[in-house]
Image (tube, rainbow, N blue to C red):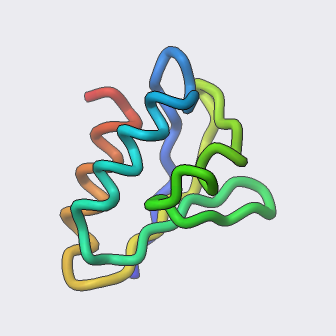
């Protein structure tokens, strides 16, 4: 399992469309992927779960990935969230 603090660098934060795109990125991988902020932890492959977080640009999240492709999953999601 790997965990990494990531600052969201999407100008709109994670509204409906960016959340849907994030879920698509996460769903490409077999690993279990979660996003934590404060006391909330949700599955990054769940649109409804991700929408409940209401994440804005500049917020810092803890991204976790656990599985056979965790490194690739972490790299792809971090790339998307940091807009690089």
The x, y position of residue 32, in whole percent, is 40, 76
Would you identify the image quadrant in which residue 42 lies?
Answer: bottom right
Which residue is found at the position 32% from the left and 77% from the top? 31
Which residue is found at the position 64% from the left and 60% from the top? 36
Q: Outermost residue toward the right?
A: 39
Tell me the quarter of the image containing the N terminus.
Answer: bottom left
The x, y position of residue 61, in whole percent, is 59, 49
Task: Answer above or below: position of 34 versus 78.
Answer: below
Question: How many marks can you see?
Answer: 0
Would you identify the image quadrant in which residue 56 lies?
Answer: top right
Q: Is residue 6 left or right of residue 26?
A: right
Q: Is residue 76 left or right of residue 2?
A: left
Which residue is found at the position 19% from the left and 63% from the top? 72
Tell me the quarter of the image containing the C terminus.
Answer: top left
Q: Is residue 80 left or right of residue 72?
A: right
Q: Is residue 68 left or right of residue 58?
A: left
Q: Outermost residue toward the top?
A: 11
Task: Answer above or below: position of 74 versus 20.
Answer: below
Q: Outermost residue toward the front?
A: 48
The x, y position of residue 12, in whole percent, is 54, 17
Task: Answer above or below: position of 24 versus 68.
Answer: above
The x, y position of residue 9, in whole percent, is 46, 26
């Amino acid at each position: 399992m790997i965990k990494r603090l990531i600052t969201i660098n999407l100008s709109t934060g994670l509204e409906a469309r960016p959340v849907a795109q994030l879920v698509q990125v996460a769903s490409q991988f077999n690993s279990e992927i979660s996003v934590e902020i404060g006391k909330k932890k949700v599955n990054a492959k769940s649109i409804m779960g991700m929408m409940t977080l209401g994440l804005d640009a500049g917020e810092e999240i803890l991204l976790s990935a656990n599985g056979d492709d965790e490194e690739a999953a972490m790299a792809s999601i971090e790339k998307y969230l940091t807009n690089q």
